[in-house]
Amino acid sequence: MAPKGEWRVWAKQNRTTLLTPHRSQALIAQCLSWEGFLKADELLITWPTGDELDVRPLIQAFQGLVYLPRITGPRQMAFHQFESEAPLVEGSYGILEPEKIAPLWQPNPRLHTLLMAPALCVDAARYRLGYGGGYFDAWLHAHRPLLQESLTVASLIPLALVVKHLPHDDWDQRLDTVLTEDGGVGNA
């Protein structure tokens, strides 16, 4: 099996041609009609950059509070509230994020939290391949036990980037749901 680095190169090369306007609209439409999105009280999501799927329609349509991540240290991030009128600043890796003074997300098991985790590709067992920094896996390792059933972790990705098996390490966290343009793969 190819190492993670080779999978990242493959996924980035293919994503460029796969995220056509039609496919991107289909992915966003799947998420907007998905029960997990509709019933969530708060949305934790990364602002899109480069050739990633433009998730801003999800941010605009969401009815609850939206939080974006800020890198706070090696393999550490915190989510801060996104407010459409507040400026975003360029953070680590060129990703836009709220200013440090924006309200900090606090875990609340009484609220249904939806985390849309970025992924270059995923496999049939719902392991995602991220960009290699380990931020989301470390965050999930710390917060999943606190939130238990009130947290849903999903990725939105073209079906062509769902593969049979990816290499994963003991610390890699599985997704609860993978949403594709034709519905989903391996929903929990």
Image (cartoon, rainbow, N blue to C red):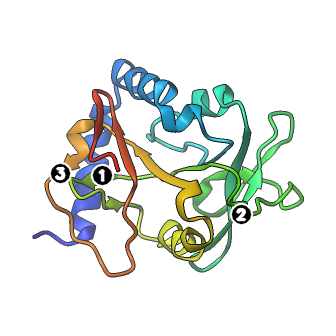
Please tell me whether mark 1 sits on a helix, a strand or a loop. strand
Q: Which is closer to the viewer, label 3 or label 2?
A: 2
Which residue position is annotated with label 2? 107
- Residue beneath the point at 51% across and 52% down: 152
What is the three-letter code of the residue carrying label 3? Val
Judging depth in this view, the residue of 28 and 49 nearest the camera is: 28
State the image quarter where residue 49 is shown: top right
Q: Quadrant of the N terminus?
A: bottom left
Q: Position of residue 5 (x, y in %)?
A: 27, 68
Tag count in the figure?
A: 3
> How far apart in space, not on screen, are marks 3 and 2 (Cα)?
32 Å
Residue type marked 1:
Cys
* Label 1 Cα crowd, 10 Å radius (few <14 / some 14-19 / many 20+): many
Compared with 180, 117 (above or below) is below
Of callouts 1 and 3, which one flags the residue occurring earlier in the amino acid sequence?
1
**In the image, 5: left or right of 47?**
left
Residue 25 falls in which quadrant of the image? top left
Q: Are marks 2 and 1 in contact (CB under 8 Å)?
A: no
**Rounded to the nearest whole Å, what is the CA distance between mark 2 and mark 1?**
28 Å
Tag 2: residue type? Pro
Given the current orientation, which residue lies at the most extreme top position?
A: 22
Callout 1–callout 3 Cβ contact below 8 Å: yes
Residue drawn at 47 percent across, 70 percent down: 137
The residue to which callout 1 is attached is: 121
Residue marked by disc 3: 163
Residue 137 relative to residue 81: left or right: left
Residue situated in front as seen by the camera: 158 or 105: 105
